């Protein structure tokens, strides 16, 4: 929530939308549990439109969401 290109970060509701989308992805894959890959697959479409960019942002919302996803390590 403290990225220099983001004015307003993702809300708790955005987190719930991400969770529901990841659960749906797992269900479509025939699993009853979510893998990190499910979250990664739906992160950009579920969150990019919810980002409010700073006026000096040099990227689109989608590009910034992809960059945020790439910056977070998956264990």
Image (cartoon, grey):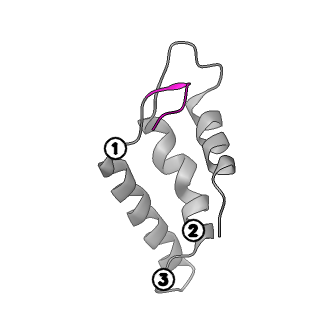
Q: Which residue is mark 1?
A: 11
Q: Which residue is mark 3?
A: 33
Q: Which residue is mark 2?
A: 38
Residue drawn at point x = 56 percent, y = 25 percent:
5
Label 2 or label 1, whichever lies nearer to me, is: 1
Q: Is residue 59 placed above or below 10 in the rendered structure?
A: above
Quarter of the image with the C terminus is bottom right
Mark 2 near mark 1, Cβ–Cβ under 8 Å? no
Q: Residues within 10 Å of mark 1 (few under 14, many from 20)?
A: few
Earlier-in-chain disc, 2 versus 1: 1
Q: CA distance from mark 1 to mark 3?
A: 24 Å
Q: Residues within 10 Å of mark 3 (few under 14, many from 20)?
A: few
Mark 3 near mark 2, Cβ–Cβ under 8 Å? no
Earlier-in-chain disc, 1 versus 3: 1
Give the main secondary structure, helix, strand or loop, of the magenta stretch.
loop
Q: Which residues are magenta?
A: 1-7
Q: Is residue 51 placed above or below 33 in the rendered structure?
A: above
Q: CA distance from mark 2 to mark 1?
A: 20 Å
Q: Quadrant of residue 21?
A: bottom left
Q: Is residue 8 placed above or below 42 in the rendered structure?
A: above
Position of 19 with respect to 34 (left or right) is left
């Amino acid at each position: 929530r403290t990225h220099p290109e983001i004015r307003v970060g993702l809300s708790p509701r955005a987190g719930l939308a991400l969770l529901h989308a990841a659960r749906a992805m797992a269900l479509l894959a025939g699993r009853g549990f979510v893998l990190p890959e499910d979250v990664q697959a739906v992160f950009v479409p579920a969150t990019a439109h919810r980002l409010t960019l700073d006026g000096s942002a040099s990227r689109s919302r989608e590009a910034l969401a992809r960059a945020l996803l790439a910056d977070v390590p998956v264990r």
